Image: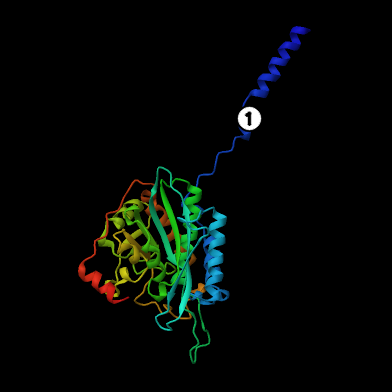
Amino acid sequence: MKKICTLLFVFVLAYACKPNKEKVVKAKEITVEDIDTTTVRKHLYTLASDEMEGRATGTPGIEKAAQYIEGEFKRIGLTTYDTLKTYRQTFTFKNRRTKKDITAFNIIGVLEGKSKKDEYVVVSAHYDHLGIRVKEGQKDSIYNGADDDASGTTAVLALAEYFKKKNNNERTIVFVAFTAEEMGLVGSTHFGKDVDASKFVAGINIEMIGKESNFGPKTAWLTGFERSDFGKIIQKNLKGTGYQLHPDPFKKFNLFFRSDNASLARLGIPSHTFSTGPIDVDVHYHKASDEAETLNMSNITETIRAIAIGTESIIKGEDTPTRIQLTEAEMGRRKKKK
């Protein structure tokens, strides 16, 4: 009897120590499919709502937008930038039109890198727009700026969540919602004043991705394509995805210098802007009619996914774009526009 009890004890002990395979749950693999239209729609419709009053810099409307972005950065789990105690990089500048001082703030969140945490990649868009403008004969006075650039800010938020979950960024990613772009790249210029450009590997700026591009479905274009090999790296990474990146087709508009990428590019950082906007025929550009309902959520979602795939080798530290070189004439032209 004693022998039987001993054998029974050994059997029970062995069974208890046996791994329970049914309880082993593998972690879900994060893919770009996790960037979905539901989340895109939520961000876009919130930022472009009438409640935000067109997000003009220095107004209560942009304060609401800033609070929303800060809340999302906190939910995602981003840390603050450099020596800042909050997500706000606050500064004051003078309005060139009214000559009055405006207090403004870039909203910055950081996802620290691993093996190359002292090398930085900026993912950015401007979250300001034109505010409220009353015009005779115009029923709608709120310039919601859905495409310009709530769509780009939506991309920044979606990419922040994606790369946080992906957890494979060897380089540090700095997610920035720039203010006062519509007033002359003021926010991005302020940001660029104190950066050590040698540590910044790339600038991924996103603007106006709410409409199908002139190249057709599942395409985007990149400003300043020929100025570094950034675009070629993206093209390489997008092979086989069905999505294509093209050089900027609107050279006459000088778009490379008209968005926030220019503030970093002038420091030599390979910083470019992704867009799908048919700027030559866009009837809603800088109009009160630039509302969320005019945009294609699938187009935005597909473009954000393409940017995630296209830039991942840079973020993982596998590719490093060549630096930007500006001619003296370009530097002079840029200075005249200040």
* Residue 175 percent coordinates (x, y): 45, 58
Q: Residues within 10 Å of mark 1 (few under 14, many from 20)?
A: few
Q: Nearer the viewer, residue 243 or 93?
A: 93
> Extreme right residue here?
1
* Residue 34 percent coordinates (x, y): 51, 53
* Residue 91 percent coordinates (x, y): 46, 69
Taking the image as shown, residue 26 lies to the left or right of residue 96, namely: right
Taking the image as shown, residue 165 lies to the left or right of residue 188, namely: right
> Pointer 1: what residue?
20
State the residue at coordinates (36%, 74%). Answer: 279
Scheme by which the image is coloured: rainbow
Q: Nearer the viewer, residue 253 or 247?
A: 253
> Extreme bottom residue here?
136
Query: Quick check: 49 above or below 218?
Result: below
* Residue 160 percent coordinates (x, y): 48, 55
- The C terminus: image quadrant: bottom left
